Image (spheres, helix red, strand yellow):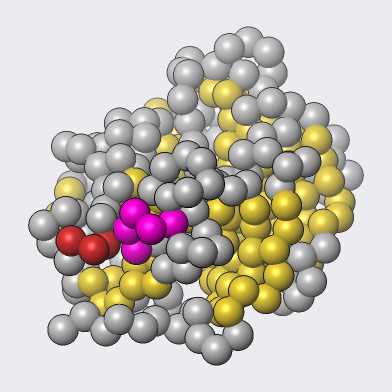
Amino acid sequence: MMKMKIEHRFLAIDEGRQQLSLVDTGKEGVLWTVDLADYPLARDMQRLDAGRVLVGYDRGFFELEVATGAIGNVCARWTDVTAVCRQPDGATLVTGYNLDGTGGINVLTLDRKLNLVHAARRDGDYVRLMRTTPQGTYLLCMNDHILEATPDLADVRRFAAPGFEHAWKAERRADGGTLVSAGYGAFTAVFDAGGQLVRRFGAEGEVPGAVAPFFYASFEQLHDGRLLVANWQGHGPDNGGKGRQLLEFGADGRLQGSWSAEDRFSSLQGILVV
């Protein structure tokens, strides 16, 4: 039986209202909210340390103080940035479309002082989140497939499943497999270490009707195998009542609970547990 209440503290990008909030689904509720009008199309978040988070947005990235929502260390140089990733050596990877002016997909590497030290390019006109793997490769969401590529964006292999449309995020699992949110496919896909599709879950018909799967965007893998998924419901400020906004799946892929706050949020797109 699905438990209705789930308890998490997380950062939430509400794409529909262009806001970023710190949320506690337990007693504390919404702890703070910042307006993203000056930082449009924020999509990506990465925990830097106990107090700071890196947030990627259309023109670049900024650092956010988790406790207060204060924004600092802004880097704004481009248009169509879709993902950012701080590396262990302090470098920052910036992914997006046409970042070098040549009309393709780019991953740029900036050093600690934000100097450009490497630029990779490949043909293409769509990319969303990018994640690195322990193997030193990149996982790029390319609409109907996930591309695993070298740092120079040469093909390593591709992951695809029927229903991928604007696939949003891919992440390597501890067992060597790959987890993917299918975008408008509104399901989560699991590939094994060999790249074969072994499971999909969370789709319409597998969850209660009130969930209304529409677009599975960002997700968070928890240490015990549970998975949190943002169920984005559409552009604009008035989508909060269309479906359950945050979903929690067990390690077996079964929905364990969900959360919504339709009076405060429209369309959750980015989530990061803190």
Q: Nearer the viewer, residue 138 or 171?
A: 171
x, y (%) of residue 34? 73, 58
Point 55% across, 63% down: residue: 264
Q: Nearer the viewer, residue 243 or 222?
A: 243
- Position of the N terminus, as image quadrant, is bottom left
Can residue 188 be spotted in the picture?
no
Relative to residue 137, is residue 260 depicted above or below? below
x, y (%) of residue 183? 34, 43
x, y (%) of residue 80? 62, 28
Can residue 166 be spotted in the picture?
yes
Point 82% across, 57% down: residue: 71
x, y (%) of residue 35? 73, 52
Query: Which is the main secondary structure of the residues drawn in magenta?
Result: loop
How many dots with numbers? 0
Q: Which residues are magenta?
A: 240-244
Q: Is residue 269 left or right of residue 196?
A: right
Relative to residue 220, is residue 87 depicted above or below? above
- Position of the C terminus, as image quadrant, is bottom right
Q: Is residue 253 left or right of residue 231?
A: left
Outermost residue, left side: 205
State yes or no: residue 252 in magenta.
no
